Image (tube, rainbow, N blue to C red):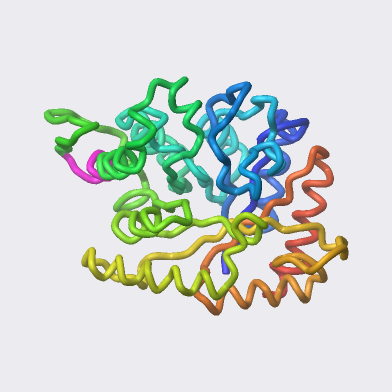
Amino acid sequence: MEYGFYLPNSGPSVQPDALASIAQLGDRLGFYCMVMPDHVLQPNQVASPYPYSVTGDILEAGQSGDGEWPEQITTLAYLAGVTERIRMVTSVMIIPYRNPILTAKMLSTLDMLSKGRVILGAGVGWMEEEFELLNTEPFAERGAVTNEYLRAFIELWTKDDPEFSGKYVNFSNITFLPKPVQKPHPPIWIGGQSKPAIRRAARIGNCWHPVGAIPAAPLEPEELAENLVLLRDYAEKAGRDPSQIQVSVKAPLYDANDSSGPRRRFSGSPDEVRQDVQTYADVGVTHLIFDFRSSDPNQNKDRMAAFAEEVMGVT
């Protein structure tokens, strides 16, 4: 099992020194990756239902409502310069938000400058208001846009003379450099729980990257196993080897000292957390991404260190 952690996206922990110290600690502790979310702006009023909240309210889900979202690629580029080994995941990048050729260029440049440490976590997005403000392709077409943009990325990253003709992307007779360090290209982790997301992972992705262990998306092992049957079926129909598609679950770690109510996955004693890790590994999960974030950077780091000692060190 490989382990990752969420990077802070609001509050004191996103200040440069605090953010760098969190990333550097993760690097020293041996975490596989750090993940950064993606919003360009937050409209003052959001009617779109948030998929990872029971009520559909993004604020009820504990997300910052103050618009304090550092830009994803810029932040990871900064952290690449202060770390050595840890991989950087856009988790997830909302693919329709940015020009595809420019995005492919930014990611390939970051992969080159970081010496091959970029992972593209890709999603279709959910906030229609943000799509409208960014003047993207139509919100209702975001799945098709994402599929086409991802295929354009791969064309640009892997071909000496890239060309592409689609509904949303067209290019030919161009030179695209630098190419990514990773070959054939940086891993693509496909986010989302829906059947279209699973199909996208099977056809394009190197990894399926859903959210689990939260009330709105518990993704218990039984449900996960059913989805993996679907993933394998889609992959075989696409002519791909299902064993080559990994599974990375974002599974927030709740306070191990919280004993109120029924125990939730990845909460409780270290032994209980380790047992949950093993249960998900047995189903086929290869990576677990945990949430240690706090408004206090020191508490964030204390949680990371405790997890590394009590769980990572003995699993």
Q: How far across and how far down the image is residue 221, in percent? A: 57, 73
Position of 111 with respect to 43 (left or right) is: left
Is residue 178 shown above or below 300? above
Q: Residue at x 35, y 32 (%)?
A: 105
Q: Give the number of callouts.
A: 0
Kindly indicate the quadrant of the structure image that contains residue 17: top right
Magenta stretch in the rendered image: 154-160
Is residue 32 shown left or right of residue 258? left
Magenta segment main secondary structure: helix
Q: Estimate the x, y position of residue 218 in percent, counting from the top left.
A: 62, 62
Considering the image in quadrants, where does the C terminus appear? bottom right
Residue depicted at 58% across the width and 41% down the height: 50
61 vs 301, nearest the viewer: 61
Looking at the image, residue 243 sits to the left or right of residue 295; the answer is left
Tell me residue 220's x, y (percent).
59, 69
Residue 74 is situated, as x and y percent measured from the top left of the image, at: 53, 29
156 inside magenta stretch? yes
